[in-house]
Each structure stands twice: as C-alpha cells, then as structure tokens.
Image (spheres, helix red, strand yellow):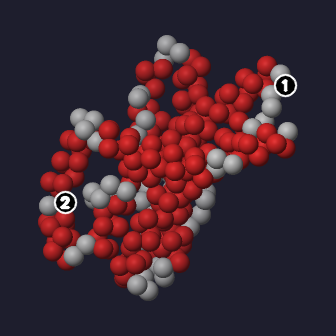
Amino acid sequence: MSLFSYLDNPTSLVLMIGIRVLIIFTILPIHEYAHAYAAKKMGDNTALISGRLTMNPLAHVDIVGAIFLLVFGFGWAKPVPINPRNFKNYKKGIAITAAAGPLSNILCAAIGIFVTQIIYGIPLRSEQAVIALSYVDIALSFFISINISLAVFNLIPVPPLDGSKILSSFASAKVNMFMYSHQQLIYIAFLVLLFTNVLQVPLGFLSNLIYKGLNYLFFWVEPLMKLIF
C-alpha cells in the first residue's frame, strides 16, 4: 500500500515509514551482499571489484527503487554484477549465487522469529514495558513477513528474479532456450498475474508455510525463557 493510505493515521504513517526505511537500509543490502559473497566463494570477484561485497547500504541502494519502496511499498536495489564465466563450476555457481539472496532473507526471518520468541517469554511488570515491547513486536512482525515474502517472491522462476537463475542451472538446454526466447512474453504474463492478485494466494500459502516451519524450529525458546524468569 502507498503511504497516502496512511495519511489519516499519523501513528501508522510514521511506523510504516520507519519499516520501509529499515527495508531499504537493512533487508535489501543483506540480500544483495549475500549474492556478492556467494559469487566470490564460487570464484567470481566481479562484485568485490565493483565495491558490492559490503554491508554498506549506500553501495546497494538504487535511488528510484528506494523512492518507490518508500512511497508505494514495492521497490528494488541495484543488482549485484557477476560474471558466471569466472565460476569454478558454471551451473553450481549460478545456482548458489542466485539462491544466496532468498536464503539470506529466510535467515533474517528466522533471527526475527527467535527474538520474538524471547520477547514473548519475558515477564512484563509495567505498562510502559508492555507498550514498548508491543511496538518492538509490531516491527519484528513486519521484518519477518517482509523477509519471507521477499524470499518467496524472488524464488519465482521468472526472469530477472533469482528463481529463474536457479531453474536454469537444473533445467535442460531445451527448457532454457524456451525461457530465453520467450522471456519478454513470460515477464509480461507474470506482471499481469502479479497486478491482478492471481499470485497472492499461492505466494501467501508458501510464505505462511515457511513462517510456520521457522516458528516450529524455535518452539522451545518461549518455554525456556519462562523457566529462566
């Protein structure tokens, strides 16, 4: 949703601006750094030479993409440059480098869920503490959901998303040639499905599945915290 939808609620507006700034300066840079790091490990130093193997958000922020994300709720960072010809193993290098971005988002979501479970296990003895932690909980909920949504979205096998690069590493030459020859039509069809909300249900289902799986991994944290306190 655009920021204009929150103009009648100043509290929600400030919270949403803060969350989107967090996305721009933490989530997107982590995603792009993961691509750069994986590429280097696979033998390609292009991202390192280009100054993209860094957590500095200024190296990754695309001005137009950041403005779109801030105002309209969707945006992008600068893609990390890679040269697959430098990979020690061409197909493996492409697959791992592409998967690194979504996996970094899932890892961030897991950390967010872990911290949330810790918070749930802390006994609160004042109204101020309840209010403060409720805002932290809201921010963490957005942080978790955005990371999971970004991971699921990027795993869609449509160019130029990461999923298409992963698919190309395992697909036959015939499938790759079809994808390459029809990539514009595939991309247009994808945009139509995206903006008509046809993909909302399957993407929401996958996001919810990942959330439940991650949440299950940390089922022990809240009970442990209650035992400690």
Q: Which residue reaches farthest top?
A: 8
Q: Where is mark 1, residue-wise? A: 125
Q: Position of residue 72 (x, y in %)?
A: 40, 33
- Residue 172 in the figure: left or right of residue 28: left
Q: Position of residue 83 (x, y in %)?
A: 39, 76
Element on which disc 1 rests? loop
* Circle 2: residue type: Gln
* Circle 1: residue type: Arg
Eye-nearest disc, 2 or 1 = 1
Q: Does residue 24 appear in the picture of this structure?
A: no
Above-or-below relation of 79 to 12: below
Element on which disc 2 rests? helix
Q: Nearer the viewer, residue 124 or 44?
A: 124
* Residue at x 32% of width, y 38% of height: 200
Tell me the distance, in whole angstroms, between the alpha carbons under discs 2 and 1. Answer: 58 Å
* Residue at x 79% of width, y 22% of height: 128
Q: Quadrant of the C terminus?
A: top right
* Residue at x 53% of width, y 78% of height: 41
- Residue 157 in the figure: left or right of residue 109: left
Q: Where is mark 2, residue-wise? A: 183
